[in-house]
Image: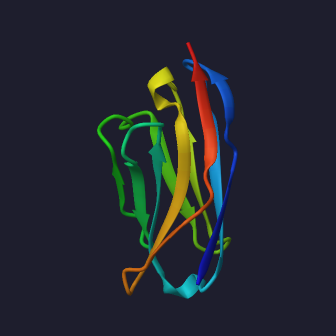
Amino acid sequence: QVQLVESGGGLVQAGGSLRLSCAASGSISSINLMGWNRQTVGRERELVATITGDGTTTYADSVKGRFTISRDNAKNTVNLQMNSLKPEDTAVYYCNAVTYKDRLFSGQGTQVTVSS
């Protein structure tokens, strides 16, 4: 089992920045891929960014150039630096971990609200 706890959400004006953090615990050695996705009411969950253990990253087109995902394997954390935020970035952001056996774990989510 893997437990994930997110922090760092909040309210910010458009153009501002927020940094989300996710702390992983439990079967850390089983984790392969970590990432963030987000969801707004009435819409499907959207993959935002992922990062592998060796630091390979992927981003949704909608956040490329604005968001940066990073991972600290020693501290078992993954972070999402979000710059130039837009109102359409408003969502609940979830931290995810995928194990080498393809099991998916998600955190409880943290709300990000961007005002115009």
Residue 28, percent across and down? 59, 82
In the image, is 79 to the left or to the right of 58?
A: right
Q: Say above or below: 32 vs 56.
A: below
Q: How many numbered circles does the render carry?
A: 0
- Which residue is located at x 58 percent, y 24 percent? 114
Q: Nearer the viewer, residue 111 or 42?
A: 42
Residue 68, percent across and down? 48, 45
The image's colour scheme reads rainbow
Q: Say above or below: 15 vs 103.
A: above
In the image, is 114 to the left or to the right of 56?
A: right
Residue 48, percent across and down? 41, 47
Q: Residue furthest top?
A: 116
- Which residue is located at x 38 percent, y 39 percent? 43
- Which residue is located at x 40 percent, y 48 percent? 45
Residue 71, percent across and down? 54, 62
Q: Nearer the viewer, residue 23 or 115?
A: 115
Q: Say above or below: 113 vs 71.
A: above
Q: Quadrant of the N terminus?
A: bottom right
Q: Residue furthest front?
A: 42
Q: Say above or below: 75 vs 114.
A: below
Quadrant hosting residue 103: bottom left
- Which residue is located at x 55 percent, y 19 percent? 15
Q: Quadrant of the C terminus?
A: top right
Q: Residue furthest left?
A: 61
